[in-house]
Amino acid sequence: MLATIITPLAAQVPQHPGRATNFAERPAIAVGVAWYPEHWPEARWDTDLKMMRAAGFNTVRLAEFAWSRMEPAEGRFDFAWLDRAIAAAQRHGFMVVLGTPTAAPPAWLTQAYPDTLRVDENGTRAGHGGRRHFSFASARYRVFARRIAQEMAKRYGHHAAIVGWQIDNEVGPPSFDPESVAAWHKFLKQRYGTIETLNERWATQYWSQHYDDFDSVPLHATGQQNPGLLLDFKHFTSATWTGYVQDQARVMRPLIDSRAFITTNTMFWNSGFDHFQMHRDLDIASWDNYIPDGRPDWVANGANHDLVRGYKRRNFWLMETQPGRVDWVPVNRALDPGQVREMAWQAVSHGADAVLYWQWRSAMNGQETFHGAILGQDGQPNPILPEIAQTAKGMTAAATLLADTQPTAKVGMLFSYDSRWAIDIQRHNKDFDPVKSFVATYRPFRVASQGVHILSVDDALSAYPIVVAPNLNVITQAQADRLAAYVRGGGHLLLGPRSGMKDDANALWPQRQPGPLGDLLGGRVSQFYALDETVGVKGGFGTATASLWAEALEPTAPDTQVLATYSEPGGWLDGKPALLSRAVGKGRISYLGAWLDDAAMRRIADDLLAQAKIAPLVPSAHPDLEISERAGGGKRVLIVINHGKEPRPLTPPSGARLAQGDWANGTMAAHGVALFNLGK
Ligand code: GLA
C-alpha cells in the first residue's frame, strides 16, 4: 500500500496535557535504559534488573531490534522469551516501552524477498548485516512490518507494565527501488493533479525539462536537478516515511491500552523528512540526544530539545542518550565527569518527561562494542554508573514536583523544513547552513529570555509576544496571511535573511522578498549578495558585521523605518538599509537582511525583549548557567544547570525555595544542577 493513500488513525487525545504520558498514576518522570535481554543468558536477567533498580531506574525499553528472535522463520513467532523478559521487568517494578523491530529485518525475509531491500541513489541494493536496509516504499516489507507490529500489540497491548510503543528506530534513509519510483509518480500526481500543473510550478520550459506524463519524472535526491523536483523529493520522503510509521500505528492502536503512547524515536536535525508532519498522528515525540564529539554546546543542544518539543507542543521522551561517549565519529570523546548528569537535566528542563540511556551493557560483538554503556563486558559497572544513579535518583525524587509542568517561553521561533531544504538545495553561499543560522539566531534569544519555543509555521502564535523566523525562505500565501494576522493582533514578527523568497514548489515568488509579506513590511529586498568577507552594519544597536549573506533593503511605504544600514566597504551595499521595521495594527514586523555577528544579535534580542517587556527569570546570569522554567498544575519550577567547570554565583528569584541540587550560599557548583520551587 502506498504511503500517500494511507488514512492515519488520529493521535490519542492527551488526558493529561501537561505530561508526555496518559498514565496519571505512574511516575511522571521515567528514567531508564535500553535493555537487550536477547543478548544475554536468561540466568543473568535478574541480576541486571536488580542493578538497574539499584541505579534508580524505573523504565526499560526492549525488543526494538529483536525481529529474528521474535519471528525466527516466516510466520513462526516465538514470544516466550519476551514474555519472560517483560514479566521479569515487571517483577522488578519497571515501566516498559516496547519497540517494533522493523529497523532490522531478519535474513530470512530479505533473502526470500530481495525486492524489500533498499536501493541507493546510484542503484546499489543493500544487503544483510547492517540495519535500515529495507525500502520505505516496499508494499511487501510493510506487510511483514505490520504483521510483527500487530502480533506484538495483540500479545502485549494490555500488559500492565507497558506504557508506550516505539515504532521502528530512527527512520530516515530513502530508497530508489522501482517501487519507490512508482510511489513517487503517484505522489506527484496526487500533489499536482495534472502534468501541466507540475510543469508550470517547476517552470520546466527551462532547459527543455518539460514532462509529458508523471511516469517520466525521474526520482532524484541530489545532483543538478530542478529545485522544484528536489524539494518535492523531500515532500515525497516525508509522506512516505510518515505513511510507513502510520502503517504500523494503525494496526497497533486498536489493540493497545488507550493510555499507552505510540511514538518513533528521531535524530537531531535529521533532514530526511518533515518532523512536524511525522508527528501529527503520533502521540508524543521522542528522540535520541547524542553529543558526538563529547563537547556540549548547551545552547545548541537546548535548541535540539526545543525543536522536538515543538513537534507536538507537548512534553516528550528522551528515548536515548549516551552514558559517556558514542562510537560513530572520528574521535569519540567521553563527556567530562558531571556532564552526563547535566545533559539529562537539560533534557528535562526543556520538556523531557523521560531520560533513557543507550545502553545497559554492550553486546559482546557487533558494530557497537565501543559505544558508551553502563556496564562493561564483564557485567560490572563502568565508572559512569554512580553519576547516572545520582541523576536517576534526583529525577525520581523530583517527579512529583515536575509532574504536569511544561517549559515556559515568551519567544517563539519558526522552523520550516521546506525553508531549510530550499536553502540547502540552492545555498548560493556554500557556508550558509540554515541549521547553523537557526541556532545562531536562537542563541541570543534563548540566553536573554531564558525560554524559547520552536514552532512550525502553521502553529498558533498569539501566546508569544515575539516570533522570530530566521530564514523563512519558503512561504505560502496562507502562511503569510496567518503571520500578518499575528502582527496585526499585536505580535512582533522578526524575519531574517532569505525570508519570503519561494513558494512551496521552490519557485520564486513573483514579487521580491519577502514575497507575500512585502506589503505588510512596507519594504522589500532590492538585491541579495553572498559575501566572502564581512561588511559593516550600523544601527540603533551600534555597529555590527555581516558575514556570508547580506541583502540591500528598500522601504516602499512612508512609515517603514530604517533601523540599520550597511557601511564601508560594502560596494553595492554601501548605505543601503539592512534592517527595516514597521508598526502595523497592534503589532510590528521587522526584516533583518544579513547574518550578523553574535554580539549584535544579542543586542537586537535584548532590545526586542525590552520593547515587549519580557524580563529574564534570573537577570544577569553567567553564560555558563542555563536557566529554565517548567510550569503547570499550579506549580512553577526553576531549573538551573551550570554547564561550566567553575562554580558560578546565582541569586534565585525572591521566594524561590531550593527543592534539590548543588546550590548553596548563592553559588552553583561546577557542573551543578539545582531545582527551585517558585510556588504558584
Ligand atoms: C542510535 C540508535 C541506537 C544506537 C545509538 C548509538 O541512536 O537508535 O540503536 O545505535 O544510536 O549511539
Image (cartoon, helix red, strand yellow):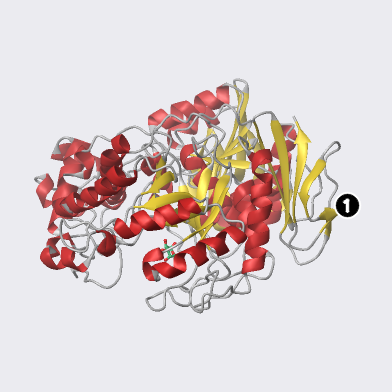
Residue underneath mark 1 = 666
Residue 562 placement (x, y as % from top left)? 64, 38
Residue 225 placement (x, y as % from top left)? 25, 57
Which quadrant: the C terminus?
top right
Residue 416 placement (x, y as % from top left)? 44, 44
Rendered residue at 45%/26% (across/down): 481
Q: Where is 652 relative to 483, above or below?
A: below
Q: Nearer the viewer, residue 368 or 24?
A: 24
Which quadrant: the N terminus?
top left
Instruction: Please state if 353 lies on the left or on the right of 609 as rendered.
Output: left
Instruction: Please state if 403 lies on the left or on the right of 316 as rendered.
Output: right
Q: Where is 234 relative to 428, above or below?
A: above
Q: Nearer the viewer, residue 520 or 15?
A: 15
Residue labelled 1 has its Cβ within 8 Å of some atom of ligand 1: no
Disc 1 marks a residue whose amino acid type is Gly
Q: Alpha-carbon neighbours of circle 1 within 10 Å: few (<14), some, or many (≥20)? A: few
Q: Residue 179 sits in which quadrant?
A: bottom left
Q: Where is 84 relative to 235, above or below?
A: below
Rendered residue at 81%/48% (across/down): 620
Instruction: Please state if 481 lies on the left or on the right of 448 as rendered.
Output: left
Rendered residue at 25%/43% (across/down): 247
Q: Nearer the viewer, residue 620 or 223?
A: 620
Residue 221 placement (x, y as % from top left)? 28, 58
